[in-house]
Image: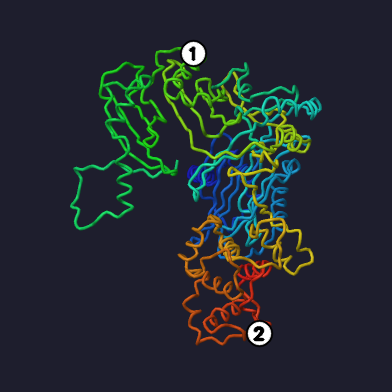
Amino acid sequence: MKKLICITLSIAMIFTLLCVPVSFASDEGVENAILTAKNLLEISDDEYVIDDFSQYDGDYQLTWKNRDEDSTDSITATVSNGEIISYFKNFNRDYDIGMKLPAINKQEAQAAAEAFLKKVCPKIFETLILSSSAYERYGAGSYNFTYVRQYDGVPVKGQEIYVEVSADKGEVFHFTSQFDFDLTFEDKTGAVDFEKAKEAYIENFGYELKYIQKYDDKAKKHTAFLAYVPKDREYNSYIDALTGEKINLNDLMFEEGSKTDDGAVRMNTYDKSAQKALGSAAMSKEEEALAAEIANLAQKDEVVSRVKKISEFKIDDSFVLTNYSIYKSYDGKYYASLDFSNETQKREDDEYSHKNVSYNLTDNRVEGYNAYGAVPYVKAASKKTETAALKADAEKFINKYYADFVKNTEFSESKYSAYIISFDRVYDGVRVSDNGISFSYNEYTGELEGMNFSWNDVEFEPKNNIKTIDELYNKIITEDTLKLNYALYRKYTEGKTISKATKLVYNLENDRLFYDANTLDAIDYDGEVPEDKTYKYDDIENHYVKPYAEKLAELNIGLAGSSLKPDESITKRDYLMLVAMANNNFYYDFYSDSFAKAMISRGIIEKEDKDLDNPVSRIDAVRFMINNLGYKEIAEKNSIFNCPFTDIPENMVGYATLGAALKIVSDKNDILDAENNLTRADALIIIYNYLTRE
């Protein structure tokens, strides 16, 4: 009996031990990452369940999905070293708001963004300054804020934090951080002063006077205007703030300082073997003119012969012509493109297998050459070609084939490669953009790999009253523009590990701008002064339009210029431009003939409305907006409407009634002043009403 009891107790003890829960060790890194994300982002277990996980080095990417199987809501966060470095929340949003005025204004959105940053990364937030902000109307609308890191009051390039706030709910739904905690910084107290930095910037970088070309599509000609433009500059180069010398950050990448190193329409030539029955069709005058124009061009055999006579291209009989096509460029000139190949032939390792030549059929000259398809440096251990010899070869080529252009060229040293030899076109002592002759050579064999000739017929602006370069520097290089920055670069150590480092430098803000040589105004690539699109008007302080204009400006909607001229008439073009902006259609060329065609195509205006530079009447403005909303068919059923206005033409009764019903225009007064011109102020109010409609 005692033996049986002992056995029974032993079995009971074993069973008890088996039932005791066993504690297994968890991955501490994953656990910490999950808890960090859940605590800082307030991820509720009642609403979300972990769905996905991945790890790369010390970064943990975690995804939670909504527990409701019918919901698409999810949260994704990346945690690195206990810090959240990215976050995205996908949730149900009011996508109609993207085409309406947002419920949250910019100030509220910025407050939400900064409250999020203070909570998620409080230490980082203390070092940030707001760099830029914008409102995006795509989808449900969002406010975007970019913050840049500062150290000791100096911005750190490449160290930014991006926050996106929903415009419908005021909630942060996207966040990314490029913040590195391991960076070290040079002491700015040792930096050279502004005057020395300015002198170094001008000497090493600076600007130059240049002719900038543009093509006038209506006049069908090239013109060139004078502008001061930035000189060519090596990538990643700055003024070292501690020495005042030029420095390239690529030189710092290794511990020992060693370096690492047209809208043309194409058409194939006609193949007679593919000819179809001509039927009864006849050539029009225009088609006959085109055929005659092409017939007068140099023919295929003649072009091939000319190309092969250029000995420097080395296109011998081993090369077979694989393609010959003709196309017409935007400026009306004809070109032939020739492809040659000898890939089926036996050749040496250092020979090219493919060559392409561009031939100007209108002016009868070669304008491009490229060789490719081989590895000609496989036998070479190091660069062995003297660049001085290459320059001499290039000059010999120009004198041989482009002798008429030599006197109007000037050698231009490349900032990118010693094996690119360029000669810029010069007119009246000034370099001309995008014109000249350039060559590229293989750095091991000295073989000509590419040649490009570009020389347009240009109408040049005279050099009469241009400002001096010193006047430009005094205007654009100030203590407010040439400032200290910490520039970020990658550093490689002997152990082949990669880390990030910073260098204290002087850098000029907006150093890629062009300046009109006559006025020193900042200009775009077409020589035009960019329109002021801040929509901060200086003439509406006491005008009834002010609150409407300011609200629209937050959405990047408005009329260009520093003054609104609120009581002046608005043109159809400017009004329709506002309508397009309200629809988030910023891609139209508002000032071309194509804009009217687009508005007609969309049914917003009729053909008789296409003169867009005339004023728009109040009733036509309402008509355009109703058409924009897609209610044209209903609006034209005039007999079904009871119009609240007494001055509406019979054929516009439907439009006016719908305009009032949708609160596009106010019906507090029974007079719309339908035939009067719409003012610029009232145009903005119509757009505001459109965006706030129920």
Left or right of 683 on screen, residue 275: left
Query: Residue 632: percent from the left, percent from the top?
Result: 49, 75
Query: Which mark is drawn over residue 510?
Result: none
| Quarter of the image where the C terminus is located | bottom right
Q: Which residue is drawn at 49% across and 60% down?
A: 69
Q: Can residue 148 be seen in this view?
A: yes
Dot 2: what SS? Answer: loop
Mark 2 against mark 1, which lies toward the viewer?
1
Identify the amino acid type marked 1.
Answer: Ala
Question: What type is the residue that disc 2 sits on?
Answer: Asp
Query: Is residue 320 rendered to the left or right of residue 213?
Result: left
Residue 112 sits above or below residue 102 on the image: above
Q: Of helix, strand and loop, which one carries label 1? A: helix
Of 97 and 21, the residue lying toward us: 97
Could you say which is closer to the camera, residue 113 or residue 50?
Answer: 113
Q: How many marks?
A: 2
The residue lying toward the viewer, choosing from 691 and 413, is 413
Q: Where is residue 493 in the image (x, y as percent from the top left)?
A: 60, 20
Q: What colour scheme has been applied to the protein in the rendered image?
A: rainbow
Residue at numbered disc 2: 670
- Residue 389's disc is 1
Depicted 273 relative to depicted 597: above or below: above
Q: Residue at x 24, y 56 (%)?
A: 282
- Tell me the crowding category of disc 1: few under 14, some 14 to 19, or many 20 or more residues within 10 angstroms, Cα based: few
Lower sequence index among marks 2 and 1: 1
- Residue 517 percent coordinates (x, y): 67, 38
Query: In terms of depth relative to the viewer, which is nearer, 401 or 318?
Result: 401
**Residue 655, located in which quarter of the rendered image?**
bottom right
Q: How crowded is mark 2: few (under 14 residues within 10 Å), some or many (20 or more)?
A: few
The structure residue drawn at horizontal position 44% and vertical position 25%, both measured from the top left corner, is 402
